[in-house]
Image (cartoon, rainbow, N blue to C red):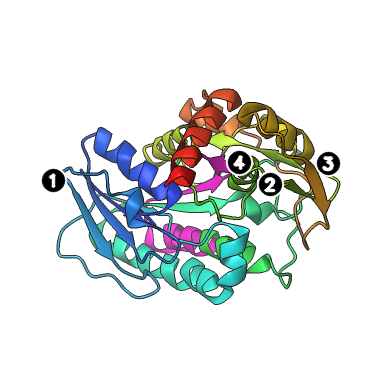
Amino acid sequence: MKALVTGGAGFLGSHLCDLLLSKDYEVICVDNLITGNMQNIAHIKADRFSYINHNVTKPLYLEEEIDFLFHLASPASPIDYLDLPIQTLKVGALGTHNMLGLAKEKGARFLLASTSEIYGDPLVNPQSEEYWGNVNSVGPRGVYDEAKRFAEAITMAYHRNHKLDTRIVRIFNTYGSRMRLDDGRVVPNFIGQALRGEDLTVYGDGSQTRSFCYVSDEVEGIYRLMMSDYTLPVNIGNPEEHTILEFAKIILKVTGSNSKITFKELPVDDPKQRRPDITKARKLLGWEPVVSLEYGLEETIKYFRRILRK
């Protein structure tokens, strides 16, 4: 079997490439390296792996056949999509359209990597797949939220109109090795600050919540969804909820840092709560996270220590 992974040189995409290779797939990695990094796939020596430098907002022409197309390409951290708003919208719209067209041409099953951000600043907790969200379409975060909401809509349109075999995964906060220290997300922010002896920056009063899923659990859930026969969106994330202030204290403890915690103003439209309802994932995929926060953080901190030493 042959799988194509867009965004395959990114944090999550590179781990998905590893998982597919471990299952004896041939893997084509497509990435234009706007936020991805060749170092994330430099360890892959398999003959069954190939890399194409390509921006998916332009059509991709392949001679070979593919069986599965995992569309992960997109800026995914606030720093990136606020710095690259037009590119983020284009990859959600044009990029998804082009990859759906490629999957249709090849008769491949298509999986869209959507996001918990489609729920916006949710008014319900936890968030189930039936919740339609609370999104500010004209706010600064709207470029990412609406790009993914459009991507879900066009994916379902291809499924209904062209009978394309599609899947949609809504990814919740994921962490692990190969994240960038300047990613802007809370895990690399806190770990980087703690290891450098800097104050940990908490926005607002720290009462907002997040749920953190280790990367190996996340890619396993994505793979199981692709191999299932379920075509509507499925949440893949860890339902264990922590306040940001609580999480900052956990990072200080695990790193052994003497850093202090400082507070800054909460960014516009920053979600107050983020916790997945994973009832569907448990029932339909037999999936739930198995990696503890303690173990996941230890592995992630080891990775960032190596990066900082370099």
The residue to which callout 2 is attached is: 198
- Mark 2 to mark 4 CA distance (whole Å): 10 Å
- Mark 1 to mark 3 CA distance (whole Å): 48 Å
Q: Examine the rendering and report whether any part of residue 190 can be seen.
A: yes
Which mark is first along the chain, 1 or 4?
1
Of marks 3 and 2, the one in the foreground:
2
Query: How many neighbours does mark 3 have within 10 angstroms: few (below 14), some (14-19), or many (20 or more)?
Result: some
Q: Are marks 2 and 1 in contact (CB under 8 Å)?
A: no
Picture residue at 44% right of the left edge, 47% below the top: 12
- Mark 3 to mark 2 CA distance (whole Å): 21 Å
Could you tell me the amino acid type at mark 2? Glu
Callout 4: SS:
helix
The residue to which callout 1 is attached is: 47
Could you tell me the amino acid type at mark 4? Ile
> Which of 164 and 152 lies nearest the eye of the viewer?
152
Picture residue at 86% right of the left edge, 46% below the top: 205
> Which of 179 and 310 lies nearest the eye of the viewer?
310
